[in-house]
Amino acid sequence: MQQKADVVPDPPASIWTRNVLILALTVFFARFGQGLQGGVSTNFLVHDLGLGGDQVLWLAGVREIPGLGLMFLTALIMRLPQSHRAFWSLLLMGFGYGCYYFINSYTTLLALAFIASIGFHNWMPLLSSLGMGLVGRERSGRVLGRMNAVGSLASMGGMVIIVFFSEKFGLRPFFLFGGAFLILAALVVSRLPKEIGASTEKIPRLLLRKRYWLFYVLTFFEGSRTQVFYTFGAWVLVDSYGFNAQRISVLLIISGLMNFLIAPHMGNWIDRFGERITLTASYFALVLVFIAYATVHNAYALGGLYIAINFLVMFRIGLHTYVNRIAPDEDLSPTLSAGVSINHLTSVGMSLVAGTLLRVVGYEGLCWGAAGVILLSIPFALAIRVDKSDEQVSEAAVA
């Protein structure tokens, strides 16, 4: 019987099997493509399309709508192997982002963002589910940490390309090449065996269970803070402090380098110290950083805070490893998908509300609101427990 406690010993065995390497290569190509398009997207929206902050936030709300229905979409395609679902998700994301090259209107932007978002929101829980399905529960944090490190390295590569070539070629070609790399990632992930993540038990199409309530609550709070920041954090630097695509890319390169170096240790910390300690510590740190983002008005200091937030939000993988430690295999994928839908109950609503309030309270007011939401999360993070009774329930369910 595996030891399930708040403190789990770090296992010595290597995680780098053939299938983990295939998944890592998929993550590399996908994140490289996302880095190419993500590094220029804010400047593209502001300078090429001339969007204001309210339009950017409303776009975020529309872009997050597919996440609301992910639980139901997953229910429709649940019988497909996870590797097949990952293939179609990455393909759809690559098509949507690649077509940004042709955008000339806000309406077209909304339509293509919605299409790409369907693929993105399907891919993210599948990445966690596939990664955790390749190793034992006691090493789930380790494998997700390694995937984050690989993704950070790939994103850095995309940002370096932007720094050297965006002035020469403009911003639109990066969407085309980014989409191509996402399609390449789809081809690579199709090489994973279809048995990964499969269970001998009948997999429920829709799953909401009382025993996962803490995961649902923390995921609900997660959506109301990170989505808003991801949307306007870079926009503040571009619109209010004049950051161009190269300077934004430099920030993301630094962020990617830090994440690449620390992400593997982050996974080890989660496995060793448990989700309760690591999530709570990251939430306390995020409160302080968001308050600083609201009160500091120095461009370089805000750039540093932007990097810090990009790092701290990576600890959210602890929510996935928490579910993985207490859930039987057949519950994992539908529970993660349900979590995405619950997350987007707030991320969609908060993005639309933030877009409406931005001109009234400014970005500083939105940061104070995000800090308040994180404070509400902390008592629930402290309530996390992974003990022997959870293990017994989980093992009984798969017996």
Image (cartoon, rainbow, N blue to C red):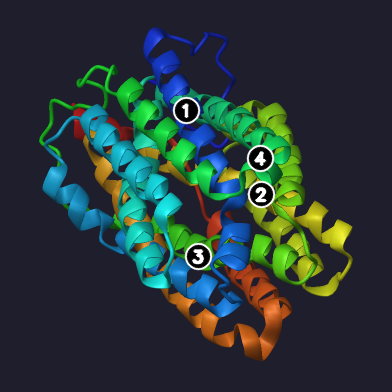
Tell me, yes or no, whether the two marked residues, 2 and 1, touch with CB atoms within 8 Å.
no
**Residue at 69% from the left image edge and 34% from the top image edge:** 160
Q: Position of residue 314 (x, y in %)?
A: 59, 44
* Label 1 sits on residue: 29
Q: Earlier in the sequence, mark 1 or mark 3?
A: 1
Q: Amino acid at mark 2?
A: Asn
Determine whether 314 is above or below 342 in the image.
above
Q: Nearer the viewer, residue 98 or 332?
A: 98
Outermost residue on the bottom side: it is 360
Crowding at dot 4, Cα within 10 Å, few <14 / some 14-19 / many 20+, comes out as many
Tell me, yes or no, whether the two marked residues, 1 and 3, touch with CB atoms within 8 Å.
no
For marks 2 and 1, give the CA distance: 20 Å
Q: In the structure shown, which secondary structural element does the residue marked by tag 1 occupy?
A: helix
Q: Earlier in the sequence, mark 3 or mark 4?
A: 4
Q: Nearer the viewer, residue 160 or 377?
A: 160
Q: Is residue 64 visible?
A: no
Image quarter hosting the C terminus: top left
**Residue at 25% from the left image edge and 61% from the top image edge:** 69
Q: Amino acid at mark 3?
A: Phe
Image quarter hosting the N terminus: top left
For marks 1 and 4, give the CA distance: 16 Å
From the viewer's perspective, is the residue at label 2 or at label 3 nearer?
A: 2
